[in-house]
Image: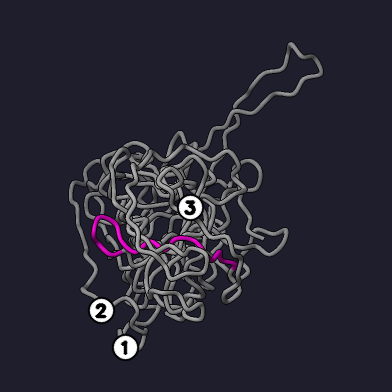
Amino acid sequence: MRRLFFPFVSGLLGGGLVVAALAVFGGLSKSEKVVTTIQAAPVAPSNATLHSAGLTPHDIYVRDAPGVLFVTSTIVQQTEQESPFEFFRGESQRQGTATGSGILINSNGTVLTNYHVVENAVKVTVAFEDHKTVEAKVIGKDPSHDLAVLKVPTEGLTLHPLALGDSSKVQVGDPVMAIGNPFGLDRTLTTGVISALQRRITAPNGFQIDNVLQTDAPINPGNSGGPLLNANGEVIGINSQIETGGGGNGSVGIGFAVPINTAKTELPQLEKGGTLRGAYLGLVSLTIDGSLSGLDLPVKQGALVQEVQSNTPAEKAGIRGGDISANVNGQPIQLGGDIIIGVDGKPVAGAEDLGNVISSHKPGDVINVELLRYSNGSAPQHKTVKVTLGERPNSIPNPQTPRG
């Protein structure tokens, strides 16, 4: 089963934080004023093999590990104080320490991580490869996609920002590597392949994260927020959750990473600060690609609508979800729903593409959604509907139900 961990219970999201103390790595010397930036070398397309890229896992580790940071959060939670006398009942604070990983993405000290790594944190520190530790400021958060952006001071630090790849080019079987801090063991490398695409996981606020990458590269509590790298050392995902398969917290070879393209779309807004709620359509969709070829769909690309939530912009515009259950390659899907093929005259290649289009808009924007609709077994009809985008809620009423 998929385990969602929370602090003071048993950690955080699978593949996420470990409640533990972090050793003191030492601070910056006040006399140091030099900032050194080391950029990753130019790389080839992201789905190249290790052999064709000419890079071994060791080569990638040597180059990229310095850009993977050790994130420590001091967490404070309110807990209800038990008492046999009702008038003595009240709240108290509990404090703990949790650790995770972060990805340095530029020479300005911008760090990308998971939201659940810093959720409820009153203090966040970041340790670099040379054990220099600095305090970080959480400047942007998106709980719905489990993303957060930190900013760290750069004086006196040698910086190794990682190159961001293109998660839309990832294929099943591509070799991947994860670098992170599992169980507090800093900068650990594990290797594997992309096991599946288009998985869905549940964000900390109950919303669904679509188009998630599945890997068998072992990731464990503490890897959260760290990079999933392709064969050229580019970041293609942010490691976020694991399947535990039982009562333990360790990896069983099924891990999930938020696609880097989702993060890249939101980075400009996250870097401006605050909590990102963003535009909201209110549906769940599935990318139409070669894996669905056996369904004889009328198009080879697009977003097949699985579910439309009630009282959302999508429902108000009349967009329809599927009503026929099927199973493709072990994955349950819904057929019979609308197929979204374009927005505002531009083609939509799939669910990730649709999500990126919606993320590029603001609440209140009006968009034209082009779709194909089946009706009573007849040929699909081409329709265009106007949708006034809403603002994504902070959370959903029932977090057990995936939402988009």
**Is residue 212 shown in magenta?**
no
> Residue 289's spot in the image, x, y percent?
42, 75
Between 307 and 259, the one nearer to me in the picture:
307
Q: Residues within 10 Å of mark 3 (few under 14, many from 20)?
A: many
Would you name the residue on which mark 1 appears? Answer: 52
Earlier-in-chain disc, 3 versus 2: 2
Disc nearer the start of the sequence (3/1): 1
> Where, quadrant-wise, is the N terminus in this rendering?
bottom right
Give me the disc on residue 100. 3
As rendered, which of 31 and 14 lies closer to the eye? 14
Does 144 appear above or below 237? Answer: above
Q: Tell me where the magenta segment starts and ends, as one range.
A: 332-347
- For mark 2, give the secondary structure: loop
Spatial CA span between label 2 and label 1: 9 Å
In the displayed structure, 98 sits above or below 81; it is below
Q: Position of residue 119 (x, y in %)?
A: 48, 41
For numbered disc 3, what is the local secondary structure? Answer: strand
Q: CA distance from mark 3 to mark 2?
A: 29 Å
The residue at 21%/43% (across/down) is 31
Residue 174, position as x, y percentages in the image: 42, 79
**Amino acid marked by disc 3:** Gly
- The residue at which mark 2 appears reads as 44
Q: Give left or right: position of 141 versus 398.
A: left
The answer to whether the residues at label 2 and label 1 have Cβ atoms under 8 Å apart is yes
Q: Callout 2 environment at 10 Å: few (<14), some (14 to 19), or many (20+)?
A: some
| Three-letter amino acid code at the position of disc 2 | Ala
The structure residue drawn at horizontal position 59% and vertical position 42%, both measured from the top left corner, is 7
